[in-house]
């Protein structure tokens, strides 16, 4: 079994605002001295794991990422006839196992049953919580210390096994991520543009006021992005209690999502959905490496030349150069090249998922 699976993708997006910064502008980064468009790894991972495609494929093996675990427990206890004071105390005991709770707020009476930081809860942990809550409702008593051992290292959710989990208050139940995702970066330099727009009131006949009912501005840019994903298959199998079949299914689902699912930022305004135009998948036990250096010098469109073809040629040349200097950097490879109509998604998924 190959230890590492590496995915290199080139995906072109039309004018869009896929991932915004705190000012509402598309995220950027300096690379090779030039401004590039960027989509954060956090955005990509959430896009893929919450996609219909991934959710459908892994439906029974996904966790919940939330700060509101305590509120859900409290509402169940109240609905089951537990007194308010008892429900709050018991909720704190249970939710507190998953992380430090917030301090009480005068204007928010249930603030102190919320967890301070997002926590990823596996299906096995959710089931353990549910069984305990039902027991407390039936017996109308506080939970015992042994009953509060709700955290699980085994029976992990696929998304936790892939992307990891950190519990500051219970580090023994941390899960090391088996999947590393780089920030996607445009292979060329960019200039962020502004879209000035207006909206017209349908009931305004224009006899008194010819002006627009709304004026706005949004920022956008178009780009061809390089994305890199590295999956430690051995660690993923370990995180999933040795279940190789489930690990392979997860890798297939993640790969298909990465190839086909676009970030959802401003989709209604730009309809910027896209499939990858090129994918290089690699398997082997060699030390992984990104091929982003292929674009340290930005790809520039020149007359009578093909922008995507140049970008594909650059990544292939970089891969070959690494192989020539360091020796084979992978044992097996599979390519999907839409430009040349070579390879298929089915072949790619079979390659990574076995």
Image: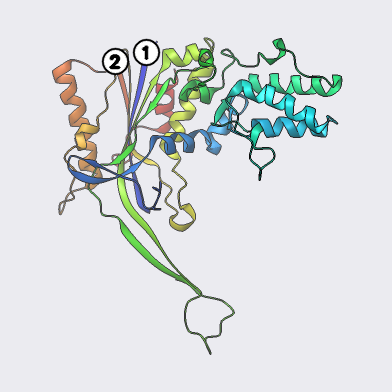
| Marks 1/2: CA–CA distance | 8 Å
Residue 142: x and y, percent? Answer: 78, 19
- Is residue 114 positioned above or below 237 on the image? below
Residue located 48% across and 19% down the image: 248
Q: Is residue 8 left or right of residue 157?
A: left
> Looking at the rendering, which quadrant does residue 73 occupy?
top right
Find residue 286 and report its horizontal and vertical position in percent. Answer: 28, 14
Pointer 2 residue: 331
Q: Quadrant of residue 303 in the image?
A: bottom left
**Crowding near the residue tagged with mark 2, few <14, some 14–19, many ≥20 C-alpha atoms within 10 Å:** few
Vertical arrangement, residue 332 with respect to residue 101, above or below: above
Q: Which label was assigned to residue 187? A: none
Q: Secondary structure at mark 1?
A: loop
Q: Is residue 216 above or below residue 280?
A: below
In percent of width and height, residue 338 lies at 33, 40
The quarter in which the C terminus is drawn is: top left
Q: Residue furthest bottom?
A: 207
- The residue at the point 31 percent across, 59 percent down is 193
Residue that appears at 25% across and 51% down: 190
User: In the drawing, does residue 18 fall left or right of residue 85?
Assistant: left
The residue pinned by badge 1 equals: 2
């Amino acid at each position: 079994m190959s230890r590492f699976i590496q995915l290199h993708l080139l995906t072109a997006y039309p004018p869009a605002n896929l991932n915004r910064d705190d000012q509402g502008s598309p995220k950027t980064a300096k690379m090779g001295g030039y401004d590039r468009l960027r989509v954060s790894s956090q955005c990509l991972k959430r896009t893929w794991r919450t996609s219909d495609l991934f959710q459908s494929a892994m439906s029974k093996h996904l966790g919940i990422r939330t700060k509101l675990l305590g509120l859900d427990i409290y509402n169940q206890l109240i609905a089951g006839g537990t007194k308010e004071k008892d429900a709050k105390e018991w909720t704190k005991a249970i939710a507190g196992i998953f992380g430090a709770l917030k301090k009480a707020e005068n204007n928010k009476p249930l603030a102190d049953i919320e967890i301070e930081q997002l926590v990823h809860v596996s299906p096995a942990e959710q089931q353990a919580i549910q069984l305990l809550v039902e027991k407390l409702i039936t017996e109308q008593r506080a939970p015992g210390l042994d009953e509060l051992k709700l955290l699980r290292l085994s029976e992990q959710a696929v998304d936790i096994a892939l992307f990891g989990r950190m519990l500051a208050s219970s580090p023994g139940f941390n899960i090391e991520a088996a999947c590393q995702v780089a920030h996607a970066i445009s292979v060329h330099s960019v200039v962020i543009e502004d879209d000035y727009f207006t909206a017209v009131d349908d009931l305004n006949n224009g006899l008194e006021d010819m002006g627009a009912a709304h004026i706005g501005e949004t920022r956008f840019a178009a780009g061809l992005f390089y994305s890199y994903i590295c999956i430690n298959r051995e660690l993923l199998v370990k995180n999933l209690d040795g279940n190789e079949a489930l690990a392979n299914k997860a890798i297939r689902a993640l790969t298909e999502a990465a190839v086909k699912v676009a970030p959802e930022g401003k989709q209604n305004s730009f309809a910027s959905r896209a499939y990858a135009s090129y994918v290089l998948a690699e398997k082997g036990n060699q030390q992984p490496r990104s091929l982003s250096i292929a674009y340290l010098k930005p790809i520039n469109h020149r007359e009578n030349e093909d922008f995507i073809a140049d970008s594909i040629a650059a990544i292939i040349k970089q891969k070959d150069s690494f192989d020539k200097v360091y020796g084979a950097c992978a044992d097996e490879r599979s390519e999907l090249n839409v430009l040349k109509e070579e390879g298929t998604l089915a072949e790619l998924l079979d390659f990574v998922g076995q």
